[in-house]
Image (cartoon, rainbow, N blue to C red):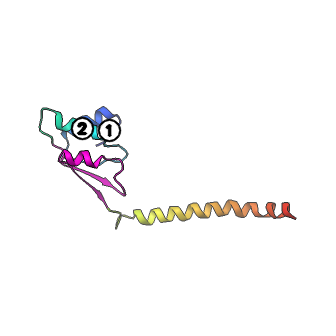
Amino acid sequence: IPAPTRELLYQEAASAHVALPFMERFPSELFRSTTTTKKKQKLRLVIQYGVGLEGVDVEAATQAGVAVSNIPADGTGNAQATSEHALFLAVSLLRHSFNEFPRRFQERS
């Protein structure tokens, strides 16, 4: 559901069977709004790509009869990319320390 505004997200969620939130949050109001409309709720599944479900109110979704799941990172490359990024950041910090080492050594002498 590409939805730049909350109103559009609620409108699109009411007509969707499956939602894949990328950066959108799915608060409890979203699930209440889809169940309180006069039409029958179509939303049956919210599936988050990657790790975590902190953007989805799982309890409210469950009460509304909407299943919530995530796509695990195995085989998608997410775990490898995350570890490479962490190592890059660590090396980046070392580079700055190494460049400052001669100046710091001279200050102590």
- Give residue 43's position: percent from left, percent from top: 19, 44
- The image quarter containing residue 39 is top left
Residue at image point 81% right, 64% down: 105
Q: Type of residue at label 2?
A: Glu
Q: Position of residue 19 (x, y in %)?
A: 25, 47
Is residue 52 found inside the magenta-colored segment of the image?
yes
Horizontal side of 30 relative to 83 (left or right) equals left
Seen in the image, is 53 located left or right of residue 94? left
Q: Which residue lies furthest to the right in this view?
A: 109
Per the rendered image, the range of residues in magenta is 42-71
Element marked by disc 2: helix
Task: Say if 38 sits above or below 86 in the image.
Answer: above
Comes first in the chain, label 1 or label 2: 1
The residue at 20%/43% (across/down) is: 16
Please tell me how crowded label 1 is: few (under 14), some (14-19), or many (20+) other residues with Cα within 10 Å: some
Q: Residue at x 18, y 39 (%)?
A: 15
Q: In this view, does 96 lie above or below 43?
A: below
**What residue sits right under mark 2 in the picture?**
12
In x, y percent, where is residue 8?
A: 29, 34
The residue located at (36%, 57%) in the rendering is 50
Q: Quadrant of the C terminus?
A: bottom right
- Marker disc for residue 76: none
Q: Tell me the distance, in whole angstroms, between the alpha carbons under discs 1 and 2.
A: 8 Å
Amino acid type at circle 1 is Ala
Q: In this image, 61 relative to 87: left or right? A: left
Q: How many labels does the image show?
A: 2
Residue behind mark 1: 3
The answer to whether mark 1 and mark 2 are in CB contact below 8 A is yes
Counting from the top left corner in percent of width and height, residue 98 is at 71, 64
